[in-house]
Image (spheres, grey):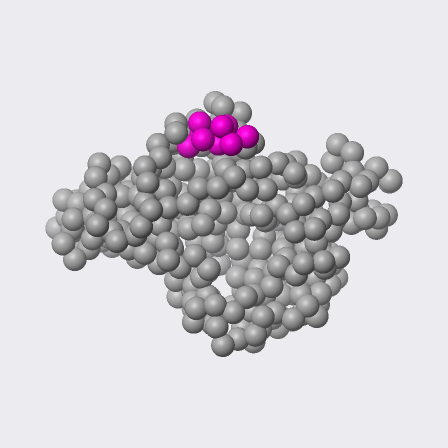
């Protein structure tokens, strides 16, 4: 058992009667009794105060290509220091990181704040920034589990990133309140968000989430109010979200709400966990999803988790030439200079 000592008091909560707490970080809208945590399992009520018990607690750290997030139009070719903790405010039935994302660290049964999770280590914001620089990374990404429920730690680390000249990235499910987006937004450079599907039924079945349209609103706010670079990912799951109606709905929303130059990544589903009985996404389905995005007016639609697919590459929306070639996470600029097509001068919206 690991004792989660010295918890950090949360921001964005209201005190209620009888030492209950109303957490304001995500649309779960949790009302938390004393000695218990919210749905995420890591924001814990102790004596009528809400504490972030994973503040500075790390489960995963790695120096990654930025393309792994995936982010294709944000500092391409750079390396990013990826950090994750534990807990999540969704319960996706196919989660690849369920061992940490579905873990509860609240010790809700006895209020002790303990966990059986192995490998939990301490890393202060200052240590995170130092580790990123030592690893030769250009920025820090909060990923692997949901960064919104790690809000206070990401804010404090992002402030130090600004001072150190490092960029900042959220790899997020987007299930956040307006207040949470506004808390991190001034310190955030990129917002890579999953839009998992486009119906109430799908989000309820896949992630146990209501009010999923708040995800769309959060992405719009990150871009329009805080000028974050935004890229969208949709994991295409056979029989669940691979129909034309949902795919077209996502593409139209991106064009209308975020702009036609916003990258959309349509990625192959790999059977796992409760969805292990489903097949992997066929290449033909991924290609169809990409074409739907292009038909709806998107300039950049990428196929992911399908090695060798030409949909990994960047093509100029002006002249159609291949300007950036990709193989896995390796990026080869061919006809790009200072963010524009070297052939026709069309902006590629790369920052």
Please state which of residues 280 and 314 is positioned toward the viewer in this rendering: 280
Q: Where is residue 340 in the image (x, y as percent from the top left)?
A: 78, 37
What residue is drawn where x is 21% and y is 44%? 3
Please state which of residues 59 and 142 is positioned toward the viewer in this rendering: 59
Q: Does the magenta stretch include residue 101?
A: no
Image quarter hosting the C terminus: top right
- Tell me where the magenta segment starts and ends, as one range: 128-136
What residue is drawn where x is 39% and y is 62%? 91
Main SS of the magenta segment?
helix
- Residue 312 seen by the camera: yes
Up/down of 167 relative to 269, above or below: above
Q: In which quarter of the image is residue 88?
A: bottom left
Q: How many labels does the image show?
A: 0
Q: Quadrant of residue 77?
A: top right
What residue is drawn where x is 48% and y is 32%? 132
Q: Where is residue 82 in the image (x, y as percent from the top left)?
A: 48, 41
Horizontal side, residue 255 vs residue 310: left or right: left
- Residue 226 seen by the camera: no
Q: Quadrant of residue 242?
A: bottom right
Up/down of 242 relative to 32, above or below: below
Horizontal side, residue 123 vs residue 338: left or right: left
Q: Position of residue 124 (x, y in %)?
A: 35, 32
Q: Does the magenta stretch include residue 133?
A: yes
Q: Where is residue 113 in the image (x, y as percent from the top left)?
A: 20, 48
Horizontal side, residue 135 vs residue 47: left or right: right
Please state which of residues 327 and 55 is positioned toward the viewer in this rendering: 327
């Amino acid at each position: 058992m690991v004792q989660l000592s010295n918890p950090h008091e949360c921001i964005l909560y209201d005190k209620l009667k009888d030492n209950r707490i109303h957490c304001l970080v995500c649309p779960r809208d949790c009302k938390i009794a004393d000695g218990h945590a919210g749905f995420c399992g890591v924001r814990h009520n102790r004596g009528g105060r809400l504490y972030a018990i994973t503040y500075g607690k790390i489960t995963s750290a790695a120096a990654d290509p930025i393309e792994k997030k995936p982010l294709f139009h944000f500092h391409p070719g750079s390396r990013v220091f990826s950090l994750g903790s534990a807990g999540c405010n969704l319960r996706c039935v196919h989660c690849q990181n369920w061992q940490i994302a579905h873990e509860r660290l609240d010790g809700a049964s006895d209020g002790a704040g303990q966990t059986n999770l192995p490998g939990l280590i301490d890393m202060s914001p200052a240590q995170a920034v130092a580790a990123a620089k030592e690893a030769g990374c250009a920025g820090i990404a909060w990923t692997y589990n949901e960064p919104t429920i790690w809000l206070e730690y990401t804010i404090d680390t992002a402030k130090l990133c600004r001072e150190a000249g490092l960029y900042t990235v959220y790899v997020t499910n987007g299930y956040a309140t307006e207040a949470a987006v506004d808390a991190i937004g001034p310190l955030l450079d990129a917002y890579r968000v999953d839009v998992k599907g486009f119906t109430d039924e799908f989000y309820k079945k896949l992630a146990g989430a209501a009010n999923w349209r708040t995800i769309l609103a959060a992405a719009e706010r990150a871009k329009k109010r805080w000028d974050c670079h935004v890229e969208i990912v949709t994991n295409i799951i056979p029989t669940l979200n691979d129909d034309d109606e949902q795919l077209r709905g996502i593409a139209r929303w991106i064009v209308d709400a975020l702009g036609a130059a916003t990258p959309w990544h349509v990625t192959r589903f790999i059977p796992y966990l409760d969805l292990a009985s489903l097949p992997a996404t066929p290449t033909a389905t991924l290609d169809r999803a990409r074409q739907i995005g292009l038909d709806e007016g998107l300039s950049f639609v990428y196929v992911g988790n399908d090695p060798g697919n030409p949909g990994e590459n960047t093509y100029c929306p002006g002249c159609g030439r291949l300007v950036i070639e990709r193989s896995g996470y390796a990026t080869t600029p061919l006809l790009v200079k200072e963010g524009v097509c070297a052939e026709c001068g069309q902006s590629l919206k790369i920052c």
